[in-house]
Image (cartoon, grey):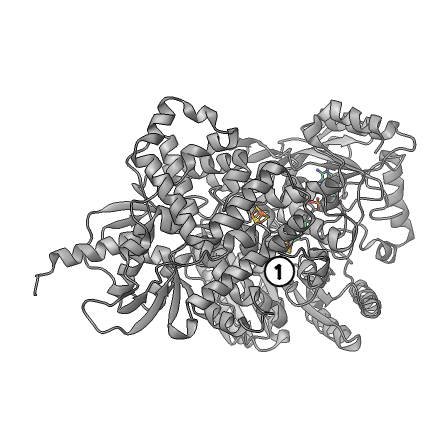
């Protein structure tokens, strides 16, 4: 990729920076400011640093780079900001500037970035292969064996710390569970939608993709799910690699033409938040701009779409359950979808929804934050687990694979094998399935 | 900062409480005030009065002595915590504990860096009530509130911060630590020194602890939203409510521009077609609240309110109050620079003052939105502009001068609650007159003879 010659913060439209009137209303919701009480670690201070660079008062230094990666990118500040500051754009531009200037370079970091951001998450087949490797590693007992023999001590320290956090890979991937086109069983379709299967979702939680398709089918949608989908590019955009993000967006638009569908459905908060902004990402691309606008207009989170089409409320449920809802940052702050997943949960008979304190406070997963900032991520995880525990709920619902894994790992650390973590649509799909079981079998 | 100076602070406070790197101090170059920016040489975070005394001693020993600027959360709107050049910023954000809730005497003792909302919540959980609620209460510190004598949405009935401060612990420029006040309801021993520090904007001492008075929590609340097609009708409603001897707890006003910006952010169901709205809250005994709300509604309708809506429940009431609290920041949606004024007039002059501001906007071709604590006569005409447009900024200056002159002419003040700081110091002599202005300086010289604390604020 060619390295842009210009300072990206300087070439950013200055009014985006100027929009912050430094009132501080965002400070109480910022998890990193809450950790240290230092302005630099809060949104207002970070924006001030970006502005200082744009104004030529500060170089793009290593300390600046570290600050941009200490920020979770959780976007809680954007929900709190009355002035409408576009922190997402500032943040992505700042990280891209950090990468452009290589202020954080080190051999180890470069290797990680190259292998994860550039190689794995741009090649869906390779990613599945890697996932298959991880799955074999677990089911063949090799994982247990290395752990028992403490062979993990042979791994580099970072990897060793991460090893227990690695996702449990599913036995099957989405395309083995979902046909490219599926029709509703009971009726002629009234809508046609495309379902995005995601990367981590596809690897770790293919059953969530299956459930997404099921609830859409149950609501009269003809569902198209292309078997091999590119990564949406959110990982790249959030980690300062805008060019890869643009390339991936183009590939996605080549694969799925929004004109063919009533809606494009995402079920992962983090992906959706990025997918929604393809219009902005490709606004200056002569070939793709128009298509991207249509894409963004039709992109919906699955819960949002269900509420929009006034989904059918299930009439029976597998069993009564207490559920609490953890909000994925990029679903509630990034996409402003907060009421809809709760509406889905409340519609399920037998579900008792217990609200969790600080439901919209980041769990520490934040993309690859638990890899880059393990200490802070750990404290955020503990805080989240405490709040979830106090609800007494037996099921924790959440709608983003990063959060899902982070909470699962939290439970595992507490040796909790009872509490379940589920995507709201999985619970809905089960309720629909329970109805089906009761139905008199006609044919 | 010289290395010895820096290392003495590190020895005193620990490295994690001393910031000197450029990336660390740039974010302390401003507060909530538009177009003010100056960088300090260092920022330090003390834990208690003893450390602050030692900090002041170190600052004084330098040649030349290093000016000290106290900072809470930096939400001030007159530049009070914006550093003077080369200053040492003493930030109290880490001194944020609530030390005692005394339910027998209805008092609360907190460190000065405690956030206002936490004080409110702590009292609330015990069935008690801390009324002062500045728009910034989720962020601002109690020390900052005391230093600015902050008002809020409940000022009309409950007064301002001053009315709740029973005592303060303060460190003077010479390092001595004074405790001023106590838990007694009455106390006339000596001068009322405590009150001297309320509204002193960090120029007389550093407040380290605050003892606050609490009230029993009102049993009932009712929020009303009255919509108007004319601004005058809203102003007339306010005058009539007060003339009818009703003192609601809140009487807030938003004009058309403010309504639109706030609704854009808060989605609280504000009427976008209205010229003005009044947000009114009555609280107290349930029967009294019901009666008061009914009378307020009648008065509002008499003066031509097109709609009077009652909040369904406390959630909706909170949503409306939160929306109002976001007014100032929400106005920043329209233009790059938002300059907020704080002119306050006797309530009988409100309608006149609102019209006057409209006239100023038209004459100087400026965009001005107005909202404010109408019940207190406290207007926030907010000039929406761009600090990079030099020519327009001249017109802004002229407009501000006219607004202040008119406020003073009708017996008002240049600032009702945001303080003088940097932003308004050149207008202060006009309000005070020679003798009172000189008295201010005499007091400052007596308490801080070397001008160590927040120099250049309020006056030169
Ligand atoms: C969105 C918004 C809404 C607001 N609404 C209101 C409102 O409704 N009513 C109102 O009155 N104000 C309001 N303000 C202004 C501001 O929030 C108040 O002035 C508040 O009291 C400042 O508190 P702070 O902790 O941020 O203090 P800072 O801004 O940090 O400091 C303010 C001044 O107090 C001094 N100071 C701070 N702490 C101490 C201390 N411990 N000892 C001595 N001096 C100290 C500083 O030197 C400075 O001069 C609003 C501000 C914003 C941004
Ligand atoms: S980001 Fe928004 S809320 Fe935060 S200081 Fe800036 S304007 Fe205020
Ligand atoms: S994105 Fe999250 S961590 Fe970063 S500044 Fe905003 S609130 Fe703080």
- The residue wearing badge 1 is A83
In the foreground, A293 or B198: A293
Q: Quadrant of residue B312?
A: bottom left
Q: Name the residue nearer the viewer: B440 or B456.
A: B456
Determine crowd level at label 1: few under 14, some 14-19, many 20+ residues with C-alpha closer than 10 A.
Answer: many
Q: Residue at x 86, y 29 (%)?
A: B60
* Label 1: element kind: loop
Viewed as shown, does residue B12 lie left or right of B289?
A: right
Nearer the observer, A73 or A357 = A73
User: Could you tell me which residue is drawn at 52 percent across and 35 percent down?
Assistant: A374
Q: Is residue A400 visible?
A: no
Establish whether ligand 2 lies closer than 8 Å to the Cβ of label 1.
yes
Q: As displayed, is residue B213 above or below residue B327?
A: above
- Where residue B12 sits in the image (x, y, percent)? 74, 23
Residue at point 53%, 75% (across, down): B302
Image location (x, y in percent) of residue A316: 18, 56
The vertical placement of A195 against A176, above or below, is below
- As drawn, is B405 to the left or to the right of B12? right
| Chain name for mark 1 | A
Residue A41 image point, x, y percent? 63, 42
């Amino acid at each position: 990729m060619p390295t842009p010659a210009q300072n990206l913060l300087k070439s950013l439209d200055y009014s985006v920076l100027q929009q912050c009137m430094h009132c501080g209303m965002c400070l109480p919701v910022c998890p990193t400011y809450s950790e240290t009480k230092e302005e630099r670690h809060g949104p207002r201070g970070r924006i001030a640093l970006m502005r200082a660079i744009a104004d030529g008062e500060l170089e793009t230094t290593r300390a600046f780079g570290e600050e941009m990666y200490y920020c979770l990118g959780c976007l809680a500040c954007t929900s709190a900001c009355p002035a409408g500051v576009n922190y997402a754009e500032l943040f992505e531009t700042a990280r891209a500037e950090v990468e452009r200037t290589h202020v954080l370079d080190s051999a180890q970091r470069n290797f990680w970035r190259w292998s994860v951001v550039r190689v794995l998450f741009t090649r869906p087949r390779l990613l599945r292969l890697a996932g298959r490797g991880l799955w074999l590693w677990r089911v063949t007992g090799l994982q247990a064996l290395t752990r028992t023999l403490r062979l993990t001590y042979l791994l580099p320290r970072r990897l060793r710390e991460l090893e227990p956090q690695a996702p449990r890979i599913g036995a099957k991937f989405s395309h083995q569970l979902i046909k490219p086109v599926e029709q509703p069983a009971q009726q002629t379709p009234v809508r046609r939608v495309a379902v995005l299967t995601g990367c981590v979702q596809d690897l770790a939680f293919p059953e969530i993709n299956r459930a997404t398709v099921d609830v859409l089918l149950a609501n009269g949608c003809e569902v198209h799910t292309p078997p091999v989908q590119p990564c949406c590019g959110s990982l790249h955009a959030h980690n300062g690699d805008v060019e890869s993000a643009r390339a991936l967006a183009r590939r996605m638009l080549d694969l799925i033409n929004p004109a063919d569908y009533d809606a494009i459905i995402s079920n992962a908060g983090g992906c959706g938040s990025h997918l929604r902004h393809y219009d902005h990402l490709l606004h200056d691309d002569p070939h793709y701009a128009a298509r991207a606008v249509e894409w963004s207009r039709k992109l919906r989170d699955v819960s949002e779409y269900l509420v929009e089409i006034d989904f059918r409320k299930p009439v029976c449920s597998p069993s009564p359950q207490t559920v609490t809802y953890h909000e994925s940052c990029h679903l509630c702050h990034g996409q402003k979808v907060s009421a809809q997943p709760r509406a889905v949960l409340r519609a399920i008979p037998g579900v008792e929804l217990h609200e969790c304190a600080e439901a919209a406070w980041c769990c520490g997963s934040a993309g690859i934050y638990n890899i880059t900032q393990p200490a802070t991520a750990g404290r955020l995880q503990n805080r989240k687990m405490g709040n979830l525990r106090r609800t007494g709920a037996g099921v924790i619902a959440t709608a983003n694979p990063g959060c899902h894994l982070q909470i699962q790992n939290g439970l595992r650390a507490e040796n909790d094998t009872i509490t379940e973590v589920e995507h709201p649509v999985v619970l809905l799909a089960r309720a629909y399935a329970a109805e089906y079981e009761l139905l008199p079998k006609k044919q | 900062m010289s290395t010895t100076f820096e290392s003495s602070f590190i020895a005193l406070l620990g490295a994690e409480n001393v910031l000197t790197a450029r990336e660390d101090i740039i974010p302390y170059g401003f507060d909530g005030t538009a177009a003010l920016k100056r960088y300090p040489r260092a920022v330090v975070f003390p834990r208690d009065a003893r450390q602050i005394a030692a900090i002041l001693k170190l600052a004084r020993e330098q040649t030349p002595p290093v000016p000290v600027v106290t900072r809470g959360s930096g939400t001030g709107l007159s530049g009070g915590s914006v550093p003077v050049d080369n200053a040492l910023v003493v930030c109290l954000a880490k001194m944020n504990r609530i030390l005692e809730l005394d339910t027998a005497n209805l008092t609360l003792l907190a460190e000065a860096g405690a956030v206002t909302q936490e004080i409110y919540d702590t009292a609330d959980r015990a069935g008690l009530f801390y009324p002062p609620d500045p728009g910034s209460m989720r962020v601002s510190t109690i020390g900052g509130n005391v230093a600015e004598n902050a008002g809020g949405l409940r000022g009309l009935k409950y007064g301002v911060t001053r009315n709740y401060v029973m005592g303060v612990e303060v460190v003077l420029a010479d390092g001595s630590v004074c405790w001023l006040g106590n838990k007694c309801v009455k106390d006339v021993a000596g001068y009322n020194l405590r009150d001297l520090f309320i509204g002193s904007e960090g120029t007389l001492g550093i407040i380290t602890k605050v003892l606050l008075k609490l009230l029993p929590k009102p049993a009932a609340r009712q929020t009303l939203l009255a919509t108007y097609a004319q601004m005058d009708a809203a102003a007339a409603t306010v005058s009539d409510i007060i003339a009818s001897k009703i003192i609601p707890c809140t009487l807030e006003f938003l004009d058309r521009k403010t309504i639109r910006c706030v609704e854009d952010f808060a989605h609280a169901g504000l009427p976008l077609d209205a010229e003005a709205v009044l947000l009114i809250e009555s609280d107290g005994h349930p029967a009294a609240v019901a009666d008061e709300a009914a009378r307020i509604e009648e008065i509002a309708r008499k003066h031509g309110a097109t709609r009077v809506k009652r909040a369904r429940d406390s959630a909706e009431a909170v949503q409306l109050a939160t929306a109002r609290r976001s007014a100032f920041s929400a106005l920043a949606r329209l233009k790059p620079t938002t300059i907020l004024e704080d002119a306050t007039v006797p309530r009988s002059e409100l309608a006149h003052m609102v019209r006057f501001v409209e006239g100023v906007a038209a004459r100087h071709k400026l965009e001005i939105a107005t909202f404010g604590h109408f019940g207190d006569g406290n207007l926030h005409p907010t000039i929406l502009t761009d600090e990079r447009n030099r020519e327009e900024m001249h017109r802004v200056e002229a407009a501000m001068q006219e607004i202040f002159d008119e406020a003073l002419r009708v017996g008002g003040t240049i600032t009702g609650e945001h303080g003088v700081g940097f932003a308004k110091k050149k207008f202060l002599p006009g309000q005070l007159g020679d003798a009172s202005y000189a008295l201010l300086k005499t007091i400052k010289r007596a308490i801080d003879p070397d001008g160590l604390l927040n120099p250049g604020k309020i006056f030169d």
